[in-house]
Image: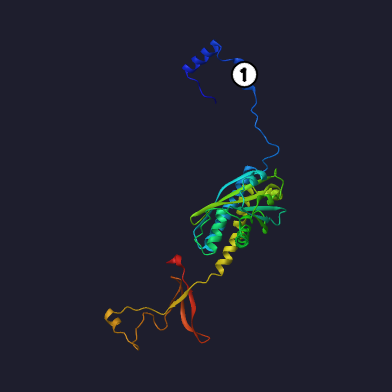
Amino acid sequence: MGEILSQSEIDELLKALNTGELDVDKIQDNSQQKKVKTYDFFRPNKFAKDHIRTLRIINDTYARLVTNFLSGYLRNLVQVEVIEVQPMSYSDFSNSIANPAILAIVDFNPLSGTIILEMDPNISFALVDRILGGRGAALEKIRGFTEIELAIIERVVIQMLNLMSEPWENVIKLRPRLEKIETNAQFAQIISPNETVALVTLKANIGEEDGFINIRIPYIVVEPIISKLSTRYWFTRLEKESTKETKENIKSRIETVKVPVRAILGSSTIPLSDFLELQVGDVIPLDTKVNGELKVLVGDLEKFTAMPGVKKNKLAVKILRVIDTEDE
């Protein structure tokens, strides 16, 4: 509903109409004009908002895995988080890359095609410096990468790619494989410049240095599974797995857990003076009778009563009764 005009505003409007300052025909023409939204056919929006939300969920998990991996690998405080997920043309992405840069071209197996994982120089040089024993400082002046530096970065990138399988497992069983690393964006033109990509931007903090890690996912690569990149499919799949598979996994893991079991022969209370004078050979009478039942504890919980005995030349107990904790 439109805003209600006050009496003074109505008076001003009538005055403008009477003096000719306001043209009624022009107002009617403007109201009848349809609002047209510009659409670029060369850069169509193939990723729906639901697809972008799902990619955000996937990469939030991936960012946490990378954080844990790099923190342990570098033995330094590392924080990686998703800043933005947005669709754009590949040309916009490639034109924004400054040389030199780390551009890992990744086979997104079993999907047909490749994605690109890009690390900016600040993060790349900080990684190398930390791995080689430094404090993880970036260079004051950016230069090209040496062969040794590229070899070190390649090992880290391979480990980071191995972490991608888990966040994507509810959509597809990924087996990403590093094909090569380029340092010049001109040699990473693996698709048409007008193709749509989803750009996932991660911000990484390594010690005192920070920078960005970008993951570029072409639409044509994920098109066969685009129907699965929806929050509805995602949460439906998670719900189904949690009702059956998760319960089975929890049950199987619980069954293999080892718990401490203790049999208590008895207890006694003695004066402090007697305790201070105890010597080898002294006898302490216990409160358990010779033919009495022993208490068996699971952890700190009294769970059974038992009789002492011997089995295969070792002391043992025979369970006589199960104590129901609810009855206590």
What residue would you read off at disc 1? 28
30 and 195: which is toward the camera:
195
The reply, left or right, for residue 41 in relation to residue 128 is right
Provide residue 201's location: percent of width, then percent of height.
58, 49
At 56% from the left and 69% from the top, the residue drawn is: 255
Above or below, 305 against 312 in this view is above
Of the pair 29 and 93, the residue shown nearer to us: 93
Name above or below for residue 192 compared with residue 272.
above
Q: Can you say which quadrant of the picture contains the N terminus?
A: top right
- Front one among 320 and 131: 131
Residue that sits furthest to the left in the current view? 273
Query: What percent of the width, then of the height, locates residue 278?
Result: 31, 84
Q: Which residue type does callout 1 highlight?
A: Gln
Residue 54 visible here:
no
**Location of residue 88 (image quadrant):** top right
User: Which quadrant is the C terminus positioned in?
Assistant: bottom left
* Viewer-nearest residue: 266 or 328: 266
Residue, far top = 18
> Label 1 neighbourhood size at 10 Å, few (<14), some (14-19), many (20+)?
few
Above or below: residue 77 compared with residue 40: below
Whether residue 184 appears in this view of the structure is: yes
Rendered image coloring scheme: rainbow
Q: Position of residue 4 (x, y in %)?
A: 50, 22
| Count of labels in the image | 1
Q: Is residue 286 left or right of residue 72?
A: left
Q: Residue at x 46, y 80 (%)?
A: 307
Q: Secondary structure at mark 1?
A: helix
